[in-house]
Amino acid sequence: MIVVSGIQPTGKPHLGNYLGAIRNYVKLQDEAHAGGGKCFIFLADLHALSMPHEPAELHASTLEMVATLVACGLDPANTTLFNQAQVPQHAELQWLLMGTARMGWLNRMTQWKDKAGKNREGQSVALFSYPVLQAADVLLYQATHVPVGEDQKQHLELARDIAQKFNNDFASEDAPVFTLPEPYIPEAAARIMSLRDGTRKMSKSEPSDMSRINLTDDADEMAQKFRKARTDPEPLPSEMAGLDDRAEASNLVTIYAALAETSPDAVLGEHGGKGFGEFKPALADLAISVLGPIRDRFVELKQDRESLDAILARGAAQARDAGAPTLDAAYNALGL
Ligand code: ADP
Ligand code: NA
């Protein structure tokens, strides 16, 4: 079992990132470690170049994200934790894959279409070719399990297509250069929506800070955000089926269930019949009890910049070693 996943170090990590991604990294790290496998989690700082960015902020937010990941339970002794920019093999392998990836494949990526909108001509080449770098990210380590949200599934399928075509075109059948990675979408990976609009996902890119719970929020901020979360005047029903047309209410129940590691129906079994005046404080208390200790560890780690730099330097050295054989095999296969 070789687990590989990346997270962009831009903006503050929020509850959606924790429940949809980071918590699963920790579970997979523990599974991989118990079974003699490996876990690679990286900060996708090279990917950040695909959109306008502030150079001065990028390094600072990379360090913040490392502190967050460690605070959430990733253990640098069991996980290779690093940033792409310190492992040039990612960019190198991307270039080797550029000859295999097809324009038409990239043109079909829904994230490209969404982000570029009507202004394709004005986008960076990096935004278009980003999924090829993503393919390199996982193929470099012969990943078997790639934990991703639903939104990234298409990119992972592209990585499989690239790996398969490369193997077909340049490797013999009994000695493929790349392992085809499997998407790993844990059933419990909740999709957390904005606290201000139940039809939009909770995201770093939402303008209102009230729309998301940041992992760096203190108890008062969390309580206030839940108190002000948009809801409706009806009490909670006793089953999820009763929340079909109530996106905001449904989101709060989903968040409660994910934090309590139980099912939404079990939450409604306990809280059905209550109004939000009663449910929101219970949800805030739960969030504070789960996220409070993470925040405390984060605050402590963040002050220790030297340790964070050391974690990244050590992780990068391990990653460079781990990726070297695949990169050599790719060069050889291409006649380089
Ligand atoms: P953001 O949309 O806030 O910029 P990213 O795109 O950096 O978040 O996503 C990082 C990881 O967090 C990805 O694995 C993504 O699937 C997951 N993720 C992001 N937002 C949510 C959400 N609202 N609910 C569940 N998972 C999410
Ligand atoms: Na995003």
Image (tube, rainbow, N blue to C red):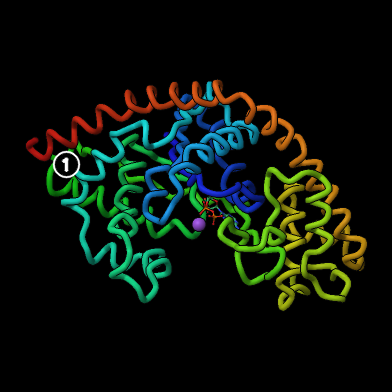
* Amino acid type of the residue tagged 1 in the rendering: Glu
Task: Pinpoint residue 56: horizontal percent, then vertical percent.
Answer: 47, 42
The residue beneath circle 1 is 173
Q: Residues within 10 Å of mark 1 (few under 14, many from 20)?
A: few
- Left or right, 159 with respect to 290, comes to left
- Left or right, 16 with respect to 219, comes to left
- Left or right, 197 with respect to 319, comes to right
As displayed, is residue 125 above or below residue 5? below
Q: Quadrant of residue 161?
A: bottom left
Q: Is 33 or 152 nearer to us in this picture? A: 152
* Secondary element at tag 1: loop
Give the residue at x 66% y 50%.
Answer: 15
- Left or right, 217 with respect to 99, comes to right
Q: Is 141 or 81 nearer to us in this picture? A: 81
Q: Quadrant of the N terminus?
A: top left
Q: Quadrant of the C terminus?
A: top left
Give the residue at x 31% y 38%.
Answer: 90
Task: Pinpoint residue 223: horizontal percent, then vertical percent.
Answer: 83, 53
Give the residue at x 37% y 28%.
Answer: 319
Give the residue at x 56% y 59%.
Answer: 205
Task: Pinpoint residue 18: horizontal percent, then vertical percent.
Answer: 63, 46
Q: Quadrant of residue 105?
A: bottom left
Q: Quadrant of residue 88?
A: top left
Q: Residue furthest left?
A: 335
